[in-house]
Image: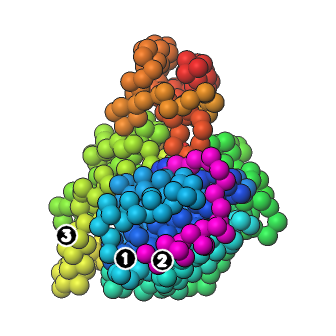
Amino acid sequence: YLQMEAVLKYSSRHPKPAGLSLQYGTAGFRTKAEHLDHVMYRMGLLAVLRSKKTKSVIGVMVTASHNPEEDNGVKLVDPLGEMLVQAWEVYATNLANAEQQELQTVMTFIIQQEDIKMDQKASVAIGRDTRPSSESLSQAVIDGVTALDSKYHDYGLVTTPQLHYVICCRNTNGEYGEPTIDGYYKKLSRAFNELVKQVAVCGNGRLYLNVDGANGIGALKLKEMEQHLNSVLSLKLYNEGCKGKLNCECGADYVKVQQKPPQGIEVKPLDRCCSFDGDADRIVYFYKDHGGVFHLLDGDKIATLISTFIKELLVKVGLSLQMAVVQTAYANGSATRYLEDVMKVPVYCAKTGVKHLHHKAQEFDIGVYFEANGHGTVLFSKTAEDQIRQLASEETTDDKKKAAQTLQNTIDLINQTVGDAISDMLVIEAILSLKGLTVQKWDEIYTDLPNRQLKVKVADRKVIETTDAERRTVRPPGLQEKIDNLVNKYNLSRAFVRPSGTEDVVRVYAEADTQDNADALAHEVSLAVF
Ligand code: NG1
Ligand code: ZN
């Protein structure tokens, strides 16, 4: 049919390097930016098909998150702001890898397989991060949408969670919020200002926070957000992207993996600091104590803080809603133990990758999920939200109503579509001020077990197969026994290996009673992987 002519014509402007093969992984496509032009064009095509199929606006985000500046990537966003449904990932892979002469066949296959009505209207929303390559790559996405004669809205520079938010709003008739970036700022700032107005904030009535923007989009967008914040929160921005390179010796991933502060930030003892990643969907906190020792507050500490706060409010409002925390194998053993034994909160372990955690968290009235690296959010079921909003508006005792209103504002402050550094940061700041907690007191809730993460290059990482939410290997034969024997040599120890879904490496994780032992165990396990 006619459109195919346009698809092929435009496609020749976005030629695929012959033989290049990429895979839509846990975070979409991700590789060197110069290999991605054809992928972007084709994801524009796929977004149109997905939009026709779901009769909804579909998002396309151009970013490679915490990867080096030279890399780029692309992810599709489904109607309610979730990640692209798994069944379509293989279409994405096939479309990206089709040679020019196969493009028509692959397109036709998807259209037939999904019974897509090509006369159905489509609409695509596009966003991008601050990488130098992102602008022209998002143009390639636009070419794909245009080739199929469809509508698009280019939101330009946005954080990943902002695009997810907008998609959700647009597909729910504005029920989730106003479908603009300004609407995002208004929704979050209103909730935040409501939350903190009831507390006499320590010192001169302001909260102070140092933010490492990873030289990325987060810093840019925080400046816009700040104007809405009634000047309660005083942000000092570092690595805001004017000088330094994106994610280079800074950002949430660097701070988490290196376990040290980012470059370019001046940390005074007990100063509260946080780091965003390159597309602002992850956040970690850190500080230095009086002895100059660095302390990291990762996704596990954030999940603990938030779930404790919500649990206390649920007791006050007297609602028996079921709350659970979802983690991955990378969660620190101390965090899991604290939540289960002290907080009596059920904890579940999901496979690495946000979609797995998100999916599990949806099973509960309130599902708090965080990856140790700082990606996470809280999901409230419709029932939970309705009950809380009802109580907040009722004529009940003052304390009960107040707690319900606090919960309601917390719901509004949280970006339920995906982990969001800006939203999580505001939630954390509000909780700390409401509970009168310093960053050090928050850190002391439990003590992390010393741990180490390593990467190992192997010929073929796919030979490693895992089970039990990636905590054990089933292949190659004998590997798990070797790991078990090594783990048994140490106290309070745990270790596992898994192939990365975003890099050509095998990741090794170990924890033990001392840092030396965690380091030694990680090293020994990585030797066993060869
Ligand atoms: P891989 O490369 O599969 O370990 C990494 C992170 C994930 C997730 C994805 C997507 C770790 C150990 N892994 O996945 O948590 O964030 O990237 O960005 O941090
Ligand atoms: Zn990210």
Q: Quadrant of residue 516?
A: top right
Which residue in the structure is indicated by mark 2?
3
| Residue drawn 39% across the image and 74% down it | 51
Please report the bounds of the magenta region as a residue range. Answer: 1-24
Q: Are marks 1 and 2 in contact (CB under 8 Å)?
A: yes
202 or 215: nearer the viewer:
215
Residue kind at label 2, given as amino acid type: Gln
Question: Relative to residue 504, is residue 351 drawn left or right?
Answer: left
Magenta-span inclusion, residue 50: no
Q: Quadrant of residue 305?
A: bottom left
User: Badge 3: how crowded within 10 Å, few (<14), some, or many (20+)?
Assistant: few
The numbered disc on residue 383 is 3
User: Badge 2: how crowded within 10 Å, few (<14), some, or many (20+)?
Assistant: few
| Residue drawn 56% across the image and 69% down it | 8
| Residue drawn 59% across the image and 35% down it | 505
First along the sequence among labels 3 and 2: 2
| Residue drawn 62% across the image and 46% down it | 19
First along the sequence among labels 1 and 3: 1
Which residue in the structure is indicated by mark 1?
118
Residue kind at label 1, given as amino acid type: Met
Under 8 Å from ligand 1: the CB of mark 3? no
